[in-house]
Amino acid sequence: MFENLTHRLTGAFRSLTGKSKITEDNIKDALREVRMALLEADVALPVVRSFIASVKERAMGVKVGDALDPSQQFFLIVKEELTKLMGETCEELNLRVQPPAIVLMAGLQGAGKTTTVAKLAKHLKDKHKKKIMVVSCDVYRPAAIKQLETLAKEVGVDIFPSNAGQKPADIAKDAVEAARKGFYDVLLVDTAGRLHVDEEMMEEIKLLHSTLNPVETLFVVDAMTGQDAANTASAFNDALPLTGVILTKTDGDARGGAALSVRQITGKPIKFMGVSEKIDGLSPFYPDRVATRIIGMGDVFSLIDDLQNNVNQEETKKLAKKLHHGKSFDFNDYLEILKQMKNMGGVANILDKLPGLSMLPEEARNQVNDDKFKRVEAIILSMTPKERANPDILKSSRKRRIAAGAGVTIQLVNQTLNEFEQQQKVMKLMSSKGGMRKIMSAVGRLGGMMPFGK
C-alpha cells in the first residue's frame, strides 16, 4: 500500500535538499510534487486542497535557524499533517456497555464485509478475550449466511442461525435475546450489501439500526475504490450514525486514496484495515504509523507486532539452540524460516515496514518477490527428508529429480543451493562469539540472506 505515493513524495523532499531556508519560491516545486502525488493516489480533491494549504502555511512559518534543514523540516510537516488528516490516534471500539455490545456492520456488496465480520470476531476473541456471537441478516444471499457459518467455525466463535425466509429485523431481535441469555460480550451483525447505494437498502439498514441500537456502527469499504470509498462512506454516514470505518483490501491498494480521504470527508475514524486475505489479516488503524510508512520510513511497531503474533517462538529457540551446539543449518530450518515469513505476510510486507527499504528503486524491489520464495519452497519440498537434512549429498542426478519434481530448471535448483550456502555461512557467523557484530560489519556482502532475483 502507498508505493506510488511514497515514491512521489520522496521526490518532493529531495527538491528542498541543499536549500538554506524555505521560501515561497523553492517550496512551490515541492508542493506541486505533493499535490500531484495525492491526486495520483486518488485522494479526493477537497482533501488535497485542504492538505496543501495546511502544509504551505506551516512550512512558510518555519523560522530561519531551526535545528533541521528545510528538507527535513518539510518532511516532518508532511508527516504530521498526514497523521492529522487520518485522525492522529488509533480509536478502539467502544465495548464498555452492558453486554452484549452490539456492533452493526454495513457496506456495499463485494467490499469484504462478511469476511471482515469473521476477522473482527477473531481479533476480539484472541486479543481482547471476548466471548463473541455473530449473526447474518443478509436474507438476500443464502451464500452469505453459509459463508459466515463456515468462517465462524474457522475462527472458533458461535453463530446465531438465520435463513432467507426471515425478516432482517426479526433475526436481529432474536439474536440479541440469544446473546443476552448466553452471556456473550459482543454480538457482530452482518447486513445485506448492494452493488450501489439505493433507497431500499438504506431504509432496511435504518430499521435494523433502530431495532438493535448498536454501540458501534461500522462501514466496511474496499480501499481499492479510492476516493469513491470516501464518497460512499459519506452517503452511508448521512443515513446512519456511523462510529467508524474499516478499510478492506489495503494490501492490494498501491495508491492509498481511501485512507487519506475517508476521515476528512466523513468525520469518522478509520478503526481497522484489512492487511491480507488471511483470517487474521485485520489490524487496528494507527494514523501515525501509516503516515510514517507513506513518507518511506517504514512501520517498525507494526513489524514488531507481526513478529510477536506470527513467529513461532519455540521453533526460533530450537534453531538458535541447534546452531549454538555447532550443528549445521539445513533445508528443514530454511523451510521453517520461509513458513514464518509467509505468516508475516511475505517479504514485500516485511520490506514495506522496514525504514527506508520502501524507497528502494522499483527494479530492486521487484527482485525481492514472494514468487521466488514459492519456487524455493517447491524445490525444498521436492527433496527427500535425507536430502533436506544433508544438503552435501545433492549431486547431479538428485538435482535433476528435484528440478522435475518442483517444475523448475536445474539452473534454478543450482541457484537455490548457492543462496542456501550463503545462508549457512551467515547462520554459522551468527552462532559464533560476537556474531552479530561480524554480520553488521559484513552486511554489504550478505546479499544471499534472502532469495533475491527472479
Image (cartoon, rainbow, N blue to C red):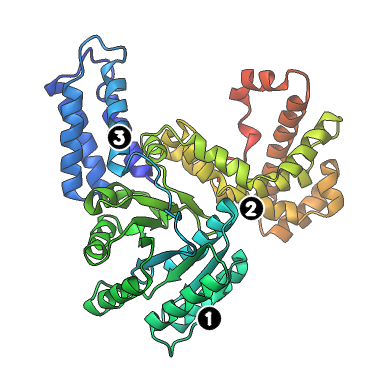
Q: Position of residue 68 (x, y in %)?
A: 31, 15
Q: Which residue is mark 1?
A: 161
Identity, as a three-letter code, of the amino acid under mark 3 = Leu
Under tag 1, what secondary structure? loop
Q: Of the two numbered discs 1 and 3 on the same chain, state the one appearing first in sequence.
A: 3
Q: Give the residue at x 75% y 44%.
A: 315
| SS under mark 3 | helix
Q: Name the residue rendered at 25%, 55% in the picture.
A: 227
Q: Amino acid at mark 1?
A: Pro
In the rendered view, does 181 fall on the left or right side of 393? left
Q: Mark 3 — residue?
A: 9
Q: Is residue 268 above or below residue 154?
A: above
From the viewer's perspective, is 327 left or right of 4? right
Q: Is residue 330 visible?
A: yes
Dot 2 corresponds to which residue?
375
Q: Position of residue 374 (x, y in %)?
A: 62, 53
Q: Which type of secondary structure does the marked residue at label 2 adopt?
A: helix
Q: Nearer the viewer, mark 1 or mark 3?
A: 1
